[in-house]
């Protein structure tokens, strides 16, 4: 009988939690052994009128309703809860709660850093849905996930720290490969420039200069007609195009697609480039986008083949049933 008593004591150990009301940043630390005790303490500490029962407890991060004691026991210590009274509904907000509030309280940073905390969680959820989207991420997004503490990323992805550490190593490898590709392109450009200088003559240089001037004049002449339309790219993408060598390696696939769809002359005006250089960069972006999409398609095909091979051997006619399902 004493052994049973000890087991009950262990299962009913107090769990430290953080409580707050909806749309409030003021949080209270409490300890409870079960959900009912946590609800009771929430009513007392947060001054919730008993007439507003029932009180619903949800995760402050995403509004998940917690109404099972076993699930409650599986949650880590200091999990943040929002207490909702009666028919009150949890609502995500950047300013008064949700992930932004958690980010601010957890890392004790300013609003800009809080936004960065929200960003890594959005990127992490994208990976959680489809791991092959690593290929489509920008260098900035890759670095954001690499810099996140392993324990935080593991909790967001619902994976072990060992698995997440391997994932972060993979992200670093992807980032390193892009940097190596950038350096290789720079060396190739320098080599081609050296060959061009060695074999060029003064007359060709003058023709090249004249052609460049004509292009610039054409861009200037078109400015009056096209500057009003502008480009749809955000400043961050334009900065990457202007300042980064091999900018196509820095951008996400979504940004690459936007660059390729821009009008070359309007983009040339925005970047203060000649049209020829702009078209060259757009072509490089198009090639990089095509390469990434091919890689994603290959990964998904391999995953599909792997899942088919790993399935237990069944009846010989099982594949026929699989073919009929899409219809």
Image (cartoon, rainbow, N blue to C red):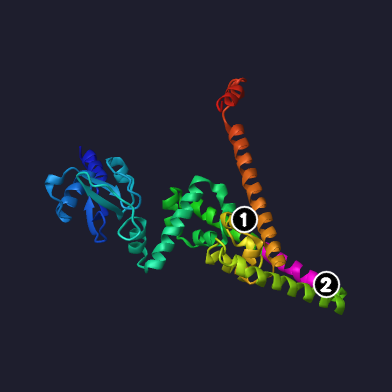
Which of these two is toward me, 29 or 50?
50
Q: Is residue 188 magenta?
A: yes
Evaluate whether residue 244 shows in this view. no
Give residue 2's position: percent from left, percent from top.
20, 40
1 or 2: tag closer to the N-terminus:
2
- Which span is picked out in magenta? 181-194
Which residue position is annotated with label 1? 261
**4 up-or-down from 48: above or below:** above
Badge 2 element: helix
x, y percentage for residue 69?
A: 27, 41
Q: Work out whether 53 lies above or below 211.
A: above
Count of numbered circles in the view: 2
User: Can you give x and y, in whole percent of width and height, for residue 257 in the image?
Assistant: 60, 54
Quadrant for residue 323, please give it. Answer: top right
Q: Main secondary structure of the magenta part?
A: helix
Packing grade of label 1 (10 A; few <14, some 14-19, many >=20) is: few
Per the image, the residue denoted by label 2 is 196
Disc marking residue 197: none
Q: Is residue 168 visible?
A: yes
Residue at left offset 80%, top offset 73%: 208
Which residue lies at the image location 51% right of the left edge and 50% below the top edge? 127
Image quadrant in which the C terminus is located: top right
The residue closer to the viewer here, 94 or 28, is 94
Disc 1 to disc 2, how far (Cα)? 31 Å
Q: Nearer the viewer, residue 288 or 27?
A: 288
- Label 1 element class: helix
């Amino acid at each position: 009988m004493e052994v049973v008593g000890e087991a009950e004591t262990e299962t009913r150990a107090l769990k430290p939690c953080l409580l707050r009301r909806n749309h409030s940043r003021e949080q209270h630390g409490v300890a409870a052994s079960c959900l009912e005790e946590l609800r009771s303490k929430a009513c007392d500490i947060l001054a919730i009128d008993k007439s507003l029962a029932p009180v619903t407890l949800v995760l402050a991060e995403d509004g998940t309703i917690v109404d099972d004691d076993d699930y409650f026991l599986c949650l880590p210590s200091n999990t943040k809860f929002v207490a909702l009274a009666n028919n009150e509904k949890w609502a995500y907000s950047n300013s008064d709660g949700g992930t932004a509030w958690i980010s601010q309280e957890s890392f004790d940073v300013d609003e800009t850093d809080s936004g960065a905390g929200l960003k890594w969680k959005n990127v992490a959820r994208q990976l959680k849905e489809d791991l092959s989207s690593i290929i489509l991420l920008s260098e900035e997004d890759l670095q954001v996930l690499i810099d996140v503490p392993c324990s935080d990323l593991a909790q967001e992805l619902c994976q072990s720290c060992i698995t997440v550490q391997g994932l972060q190593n993979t992200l670093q490898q992807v980032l390193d490969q892009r940097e190596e590709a950038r350096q290789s392109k720079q060396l190739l450009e320098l080599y081609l420039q050296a060959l061009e200088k060695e074999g060029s003559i003064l007359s060709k240089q003058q023709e090249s200069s004249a052609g460049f001037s004509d292009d610039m004049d054409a861009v200037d002449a078109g400015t009056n007609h096209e500057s009003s339309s502008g480009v749809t790219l955000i400043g961050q993408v334009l900065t990457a195009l202007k300042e980064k060598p091999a900018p196509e390696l820095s951008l996400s696939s979504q940004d690459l697609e936007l660059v390729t769809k821009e009008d070359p002359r309007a983009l040339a005006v925005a970047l203060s480039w000649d049209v020829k250089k702009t078209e060259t960069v757009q072509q490089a972006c198009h090639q990089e986008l095509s390469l990434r999409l091919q890689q994603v398609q290959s990964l998904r095909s391999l995953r599909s083949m792997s899942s088919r091979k790993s399935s237990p051997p069944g009846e010989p006619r099982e594949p026929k049933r699989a073919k009929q399902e899409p219809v």
